[in-house]
Image (cartoon, helix red, strand yellow):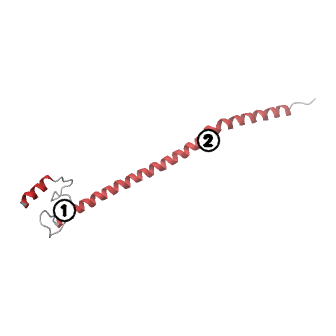
Amino acid sequence: MKWIALALLTCCAPAVTAIPSSLPHVRVDETLPGAVMSKDAAIVIVSKRIDEKTKCDARVTDCETRALTAEHGRDEAVKLAQQHAWWGTWGPTAVLTAALVAIGIGFAAGFGSAPRK
């Protein structure tokens, strides 16, 4: 009867990773009867999970690095846009003011150099 139950459990249980026993949560304990994972199999599974966690951590670090780089690029673009926005806002006013000042100086110089009667 135990062999039939073991066969049904090992054949029908979904296995996400290839492990010696297809039961997803099996405790390593030699005193337990039935389907028990060996110590070597547990070591293999733990090493695979450690490798997966390392890969996941590397992906997270890569994503954080790309996000930080994008943030610095955005900040620099905003700073450059603000510098150019100043010229867009105040540039025409500065040119008009300079033109009026130049015309005023021209009139002053023209009337100042005219002969007096």
Quadrant of the rendering where the C terminus is positioned: top right
In this orientation, which residue lies closer to the viewer: 21 or 93? 21
Circle 2 crowding by C-alpha within 10 Å: few under 14, some 14–19, many from 20: few
Circle 1 crowding by C-alpha within 10 Å: few under 14, some 14–19, many from 20: few
Q: Position of residue 15 (x, y in %)?
A: 18, 54
Picture disc at residue 86: 2
Quadrant of the rendering where the N terminus is positioned: bottom left
Q: Position of residue 8 (x, y in %)?
A: 10, 55
Residue 27 location, quadrant: bottom left
Q: Amino acid at mark 1?
A: Val
Q: Position of residue 85 (x, y in %)?
A: 59, 40
Could you tell me which residue is drawn at 72 percent across and 34 percent down? Answer: 99
Spatial CA distance of label 1 from label 2 is 68 Å
Outermost residue, front side: 1
In this orientation, which residue lies closer to the viewer: 29 or 112? 29
Could you tell me which residue is drawn at 17 percent across and 65 percent down? Answer: 40
- Above or below, 38 relative to 60: below
Badge 1 marks a residue whose secondary structure is loop
Could you tell me which residue is drawn at 78 percent across and 34 percent down? Answer: 104
Residue 57 location, quadrant: bottom left
- Above or below, 72 relative to 40: above
Q: Amino acid at mark 2?
A: Trp
Picture disc at residue 112: none
Badge 2 marks a residue whose secondary structure is helix
Could you tell me which residue is drawn at 53 percent across and 45 percent down? Answer: 78
Sequence-wise, which precedes: disc 1 or disc 2? 1
Q: Which dot, 1 or 2, sits closer to the camera?
A: 1
State how many labels appear.
2
Picture disc at residue 26: 1
